[in-house]
């Protein structure tokens, strides 16, 4: 009978030891899985951030390029308007000079007639 009690105690100790080993193994196994998932999540987060930064930089370059193109186009339009206005001003100036010459000639003719 004592032998049976001793076997039962040994079996009980074995079961308890196996449970403790299982609990410890489960704890470390879950810890490793959690750390692995955390590492993957951190890697994915870093990838997403890097992708967002690249996307933002690309968008920034695109917007800057569009702004430069718009500035260039506006400058060309302003220069064209300025050339057109100068041409119109030159035309008006020539007409004024012609009118002055005509007036001078008429004045000379009138003065000649008066003499």
Image (tube, helix red, strand yellow):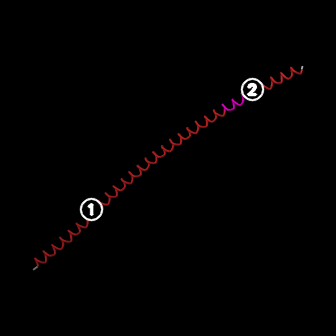
Q: Residues within 10 Å of mark 2 (few under 14, many from 20)?
A: few
* Residue nearest the observer in this picture, 9 or 35: 35
Q: Which residue is mark 1?
A: 29
* Magenta segment main secondary structure: helix
* Sequence order check, earlier mark of 1 and 2: 1
Q: Which residues are magenta?
A: 86-101
Helix, strand or loop at label 2? It is: helix
* Residue nearest the observer in this picture, 7 or 111: 111
**Residue drawn at 11 percent across, 79 percent down:** 2
Q: Residue furthest front?
A: 113
The x and y percentages for residue 88 are 67, 32
Position of 113 compared to 30: left or right? right
Residue 70 is marked as: none
The x and y percentages for residue 83 are 63, 32
* Residue nearest the observer in this picture, 10 or 42: 42
Residue 10, by quadrant, is bottom left
Position of 10 compared to 41: left or right? left
Q: Which residue is mark 2?
A: 98
Helix, strand or loop at label 1? It is: helix
The x and y percentages for residue 25 are 24, 64
Position of 54 compared to 82: left or right? left
**Residue drawn at 32 percent across, 60 percent down:** 34
**Residue drawn at 71 percent across, 31 percent down:** 92
Tell me if residue 88 comes above or below residue 39 in the rendering: above
Position of 35 compared to 78: left or right? left
């Amino acid at each position: 009978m004592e032998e049976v009690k001793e076997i039962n105690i040994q079996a009980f100790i074995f079961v308890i030891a196996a449970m403790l080993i299982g609990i410890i193994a489960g704890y470390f196994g879950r810890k490793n899985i959690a750390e692995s998932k955390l590492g993957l999540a951190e890697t994915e987060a870093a990838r997403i951030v890097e992708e967002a930064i690249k996307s933002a930089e690309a968008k920034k370059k695109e917007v800057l390029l569009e702004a430069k193109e718009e500035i260039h186009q506006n400058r060309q339009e302003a220069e064209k308007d300025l050339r057109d206005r100068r041409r119109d001003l030159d035309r008006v100036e020539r007409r004024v000079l012609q009118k002055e010459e005509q007036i001078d000639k008429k004045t000379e003719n009138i003065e000649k007639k008066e003499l």
